[in-house]
Image (cartoon, rainbow, N blue to C red):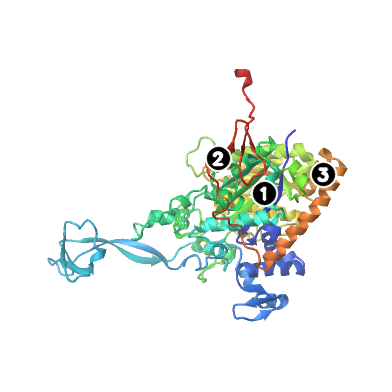
Amino acid sequence: MARLPVIVGFGGINSAGRTSFHQAYCRIIFDLLPQTIQQEVLLDLATITNIAEYQNGAWLTHDGEALDAETLIDTFGEEILARTLIRRIHPSLFDVDNVTVHKSSALSAVVEGEKLSFSVKTRSLPDNIPANWQVKELSKTHSEITVDGTLETFIKDSKSLSVKAAGQLPTGFDPSKLYQSRNHPRGLQMTVYGASDAILSSGLDWDKVRNLVAPDQIAVYAANSIGQMDDLGFGGMLKSALMGKRTTSKHLPLGYAQMPADFVNAYILGSVGNVGTSIGACATYFFNLERAIEQIKVGKVRIAMVGGSDAPITPEIIEGFRTMGALAEDTALLALDQLENQKEPDHTRSCRPFAQNCGFTIGESSQWTLLMDDELALEIGATIHGAIPAVYAYADGYKKSISAPGVGNYLTMSKAMAYLKNIIGSEGLTDRTFIQAHGTSTPQNRVTESHVLSKAATSFGATAMPVTAMKAYLGHSQGTAGGDQLHLSLGVWQHGILPGIVTSNAVADDVYTGGLKFQLKHEEYGKEHFDAALLNSKGFGGNNATAVLLAPHKVMEMLSKRYSSEQIAAYLEKNADIKEAANAYNDAMIRGEVEPIYRFGFNVLGGEELDITDKEINLPGYHMPVDLNIPNEFDDLV
């Protein structure tokens, strides 16, 4: 009997805001929400963006003015909303109009036959003086250089990027200010915030929960797809010499793509259990999710944290994607909308999945999912937000261009549909399942992914499976995009509204529509209309994945077949307390009263502190031992 991997906590941060308690989802469907929920979303964003701070029952602005909630929203509501979702890149990251570059130049004397001379600080002289230089001391601090011939040099310049839009985290949010960030790269700062949000929003006391299972039955699977490429990670290491700066001791180690997992183990969960990093471009989140659920289903792991944290909004990464023709440039967006007398396009509509489009929009995000097996979740009363019984991941096979699409996604989507049909039936698949598409907004993806979805849907008899794509609002957060898709899909069962691809006015003529209903507007279906969702990723290099997500009401219906009515009643009684603790956390977060978990140097263990026998390992601070009674799986061979 397989254990069912259920979602008992989720959280993070993306361009729509905080993920936990569906705050980011609510920002996307904001106009359809009742006023009370709109107010909660705006107050949460006001705190995140540092527009106001809650003190002594009032909201204090930067000007020192104390406002009640209604006045704050009336005054700053539009500004708060404008600080979210896809928009023009804010100078808090970098100035898109003045990006530093260097031009290679050869300098020579103005008068032919004469030699070029200049003065320089002696300490700035190169260690290896070029053969055509003559150096003369002018003072204790300066020297004169005479060059016989030309001087090869780099001249500092700046340029305006042709790509100016991104799914940036809410403007004003600075995760480095929330804990002792110690020059951590931005992606790792986001990791601390996002993973803490997932744990704390669950309403569970982690220190108690982790002692209910053996230390090696807890796992963390997380990554990002590119690594930390800003100036505090790999980016700083690679360009420090060219910029005349020094490489620090943190540039290399903190740049690795597995660092999000390492940070969660070392500073948040204190886990000694299984750890892993699977990287697969856009499908990275789902690759790690697949590993977690397979381990939970067979009982090797009882608790797993799956996550990702990507911060790719840097000039270098943007330029790399731009030269591939992958990003939506301003000139192309203007041409797309036939705007000849306008300087800039509407950056909020840069990403248009399955419509006439011209490239994807890059985004940043940190998303974390806390999973348990069904037995443990019921035992402790954890809130069940849904379940993920399967993830399918397949490659494209032989191909010419490594970036070109292939056949792997047909396998992942078709197998996911076949698997889901066996759980909820044919009608449940075709009539009560929606698709969260990869939806990058490139001309190639709109054709190839729509064909995959259409071919699979019609093969199983579907006529109008709803299709949506969250990148329209968030941009493409690379390896973390699957986490965005997963967590925003959960909001559908909380509020009953399926977000539409509202940045796309119409489906493009070359998009395959058979068996599908492309959701171009928000639509209210009801909280229990959908039994499941299929989350799709169609990644660079042939990294394809499709995850099966079951609705919370469907999960409880399934668990009622495994557990008695008395067990379910006992679970619901315990869950009431968990929900109360979780709601208290949400209220405190809205008021800005909760700091991220960051346990630097906390309960650090050394090997001499372990109690090891041939039967078990006892670790100080962990209630249960690691069992060394390991069965031989190959006893027929010995």
The residue labelled by disc 2 is 406
Tell me the tag on residue 238: none
Q: What amino acid is at disc 3?
A: Glu
Q: What amino acid is at disc 2?
A: Gly
The residue labelled by disc 1 is 370
Looking at marks 1 and 2 on the same chain, the residue that comes earlier in the sequence is marked by 1
User: Element at badge 1?
Assistant: strand
Residue 496 locus on image (x, y percent): 77, 56
Between 83 and 623, which is closer to the camera in this rendering? 623
The alpha-carbon separation of the residues under discs 3 and 1 comes to 21 Å
Quarter of the picture containing the C terminus is: top right
Looking at marks 3 and 1 on the same chain, the residue that comes earlier in the sequence is marked by 1
Looking at marks 2 and 3 on the same chain, the residue that comes earlier in the sequence is marked by 2
> Of discs 2 and 3, which sits in the foreground?
3
Tell me the tag on residue 557: 3
Q: Residues within 10 Å of mark 1 (few under 14, many from 20)?
A: many
User: Element at badge 2?
Assistant: loop
Between 39 and 120, which is closer to the camera in this rendering? 120
Q: Does the image show residue 520?
A: no
- Asked whether the beta carbons under mark 1 and mark 2 sit within 8 Å of each other, the answer is no
Quarter of the picture containing the N terminus is: top right
Residue 196 locus on image (x, y percent): 63, 56
Q: What amino acid is at disc 1?
A: Leu
User: Element at badge 3?
Assistant: helix
> Of discs 1 and 2, which sits in the foreground?
1
Instruction: Tell me which residue sits at (39%, 66%) in the image.
Output: 158
Instruction: Tell me which residue sits at (64%, 30%) in the image.
Output: 629
In the picture, measured across the screen, residue 378 lies left or right of residue 358, that is right
Between 138 and 507, which is closer to the camera in this rendering? 138
The alpha-carbon separation of the residues under discs 2 and 3 comes to 38 Å
User: Residue 414 occupies which quadrant of the picture?
Assistant: top right
